[in-house]
Image (cartoon, rainbow, N blue to C red):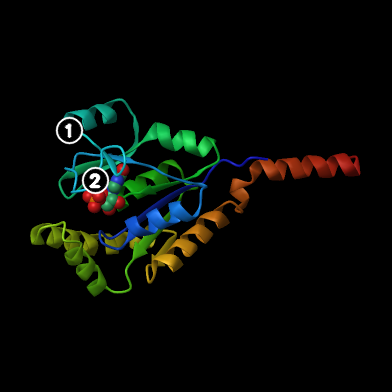
Amino acid sequence: MKQQGILAVVSGFSGAGKGTIMKALLEKYDNYALSISATTRKPREGEVHGREYFFLTVDEFETLIANDQLIEHARYVNNYYGTPRSYVEEKMAEGKDVILEIEIQGALKVKEKFPETLLVFVVPPTAEDLKNRLVGRGTETMEVIEDRMNRAIEEAEVMDSYDYILVNETVEKAVEDLHNLIQSQHMKAENNEARIKQMKEELHAIVGK
Ligand code: 5GP
């Protein structure tokens, strides 16, 4: 009996290490599909169109919104970000567990539309670690880093809307924790309706009632 895939949203402060965790998870396990978002942000050095993001103009992005081709979209630090609908729907139907790495406003919209979505929020062990990682990445100006630290303060206010908080101490442990969380979702009763129905039918058939 093939189960539909789980939809999991992974959010976290910018610099919490989500990207690294996601990469390691996808390398280790083959049942995950990571959704590639559309954005109007400019590519960072080394980023490739269609791999990290679909880099679009504001006009192109607004056309996707108008055509209902995004599951959700949000503005984050002056840019649009959104999740293309078709990839997510196809992969879930194939039984893949689909992960959206998106920020908090988008996460809450997805949960509203699909209440069975698993919401995981990744945090570094301390706020100091966060600042150090943002500075160490060397890809952002001090101004952007400050924006992102301020944004973290706002996001901390709504972190408790998530189902789980995942503390990123080491990549290996974070990958295992995330994998276990998503896999346990498959065992939830609400994700096993077909199995429950079949079990009832089999019981009735055996007992003859
Ligand atoms: P960055 O510019 O650092 O790649 O991403 C900035 C923020 O946008 C991150 O918190 C990231 O998770 C979020 N983000 C990326 N894609 C999407 C998306 O499709 N929708 C929403 N709502 N947020 C996204």
Q: Quadrant of residue 197?
A: top right
Q: Amino acid at mark 1?
A: Thr
Tell me the residue that label 2 is attached to: 47
Q: Position of residue 146 (x, y in %)?
A: 13, 62
The kind of secondary structure element at disc 2 is loop
Q: Nearer the viewer, residue 75 or 139?
A: 139
Q: Amino acid at mark 2?
A: Glu
The kind of secondary structure element at disc 1 is loop
Q: Is 129 above or below relative to 104?
A: below
Taking the spot 45% from the left edge, 61% from the top edge, the residue there is 175
Taking the spot 63% from the left edge, 40% from the top edge, the residue there is 2
Name which of mark 1 and mark 2 comes first in the sequence. Answer: 2
In the image: residue 157, left or right of residue 180: left
How crowded pointer 2 is (Cα within 10 Å; few <14, some 14-19, many 20+) is rated as: few
Taking the spot 18% from the left edge, 59% from the top edge, the residue there is 148
- Quarter of the image with the C terminus is top right
In the image: residue 176, left or right of residue 158: right
